Image: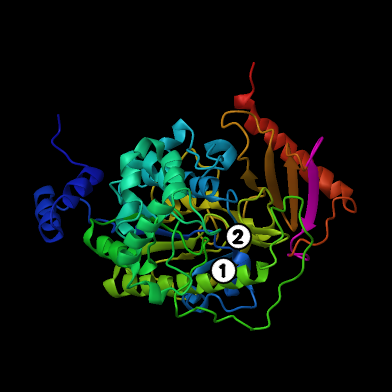
Amino acid sequence: MKNQINRRDFLKLASLLPLGVAAPRLLRSLGDPFQQGQPKNVLIVVFDAWSAYNVSLYGYPRDTTPTINRLSKRAVRYHNYFAGGNFTSPGTASILTGVLPWTHRAFQLNGEVAEPFETRNFFAAFKNHYNISYTHNSWAYTLLRQFSRDIDELIIREKLLIEFSDTFITQLFKNDFDIASVSWARNMKIREEGYAYSMFLSHLYEHLEDRKTGDLKPFFPRGIPTSGIDIGFTLEQARTYIMDRLVSIPKPFAGYFHFLPPHSPYRTSKDFFNVFEDDGYMPVKKPIDIFEREEHKNIHLKRRMYDEFILYCDDEFGKLYNSLERSGLLENTWLVLTSDHGELLERGIIGHSTSALYQPVVRVPMMIFEPGRTEGMDIYDHASAIDILPTLTHVTGEPLPDWTEGVILPPFAPTREMPDRNVYVVRATENGKYDPLSIASIALVRDDYKLHRYFGYKQTPGDGIVKLYDIKSDPEELTDLAVTKRETTAELLNELNLKLKEVDAPYLKS
């Protein structure tokens, strides 16, 4: 038996020793076999619920991303990039597996991927890298735990939350997290409506919370950012810790960091509080949708709060970028900035807990910072979350995963022309995980058109509802062309139905 050690074994061993000791000693003992070719690091940064619609880089009237606008002059900027789904579970899983929700099957609330994809993911694709990951988002953390066998360092979610949050609850009830967190929230916290199931426990909780967060509260006028099941966190804390780890861990690394802001509640820092107040901006008025949850009278206030929270993310990304640059890591790192899904603040809908698939909730920012690139580039081809994995493996010289449904994005693809294909977005929270799709929302994007199909809901009786928009000439999706452009609608609907038959086939009962 040969006495050899591969790169992954080396990285794991090196990570157990102090950096200054591990690398030199191990490299000398191994004859320095891994420095040839200088493999690149890979880093994906996700801001949750971040809509391209609300980003000034993509034409939004409010200047929500001044720092990212400046930095992106060095990046490849994708203007028509779509999430895999319209909430965390399908959206995140599509980024990390390179396949759509109807393939990875993590389309239910807090869903997990199907068993084959536990080992078919971003981290498995970069098996020669030191894999590290963190998320504030408990649903994204569910997926990371599924992929943990391929992650060298999965930073526990509670590590970067403010101490004495609900961490002891999640530790006590690891296998029943959903039930435990809901019960905890009901009994311990005074809800927005002003009451809790247990007034004594909730006031005790508030007292202990105040002791831990008192110094931070002046910096967050609307409250400290939180996921709703913790007393809060700051991007500063996460950024500092993660940067320290990136400097210290073995190279090359492959990192996935998924931050919760600008996800609700929209609690920006004092530096950006009320900066858009009375700025005169009024978005296009749109009709109430069939999936309206409730028409909020304060929807414009919510939009302003969301936009100001994006400014907080923009500022923190700038600080992370600067730290990467000062450390020298950026010279050898492919950096991707994107989101898992967007956010709706229109049509009687606030947030993304909706079956609707309008542009603000499915079109998200995406840009790639290439090592050494000094001039930016704009890409207008339609792109999908499933394209990140094959693109990153291609540019780093790793084998292209044989399971991915995505393509290598321009300008990195061997040929400049994008393949002739449809881009899909899928939501199916009420559908059985391993059942054919019978209750779902699906968007198909091809050329200038976007087809919506909704079926199985009480709002969509019979065969469901089909809508068609020209998203180039009508980006606000105000004019449904399903009747006036019958041929186009029929063609796209036929393609979608054929695709549904294909993806449903493995789940049909004989």
Quarter of the N terminus within the rendering = top left
State the residue in front, 347 or 411: 347
> Which residue: 39% across, 58% down?
203
Q: What stretch is highlighted in magenta?
A: 460-475
Q: Is mark 2 on a helix, strand or loop?
A: loop
Q: Residue tagged by mark 1?
A: 306
Q: For residue 20, what is the image quadrant?
A: bottom left
Q: Position of residue 154 (x, y in %)?
A: 31, 48
Q: Residue tagged by mark 2?
A: 343
Q: Note whether residue 421 is visible.
A: no
State the residue in front, 140 or 117: 140
Q: Is residue 377 above or below residue 201?
A: below
Q: What residue type is labelled 2?
A: Glu
Quarter of the C terminus within the rendering = top right
Q: Is residue 384 above or below residue 308?
A: above
Q: For residue 326, what is the image quadrant?
A: bottom left
> Which residue: 29% across, 58% down?
163
> Which residue: 15% across, 56% down?
23
Q: Is residue 473 magenta?
A: yes
**Residue at the extreme right of the image, as rendered:** 484
Number of labels in the image equals 2
- Tell me if label 2 and label 1 are in contact, CB under 8 Å: yes
Label located before the other in sequence (2 or 1): 1
Q: Where is residue 205 in the image (x, y as percent from the top left)?
A: 36, 56
For the rendered model, the colour scheme is rainbow
**Residue at the extreme top of the image, as rendered:** 510
Q: How far apart are marks 2 and 1 (CA)?
A: 9 Å
- Magenta-drawn stretch, dominant element (helix, strand or loop): loop
Q: Is residue 443 magenta?
A: no
Q: In this view, does 296 lie above or below 184?
A: below
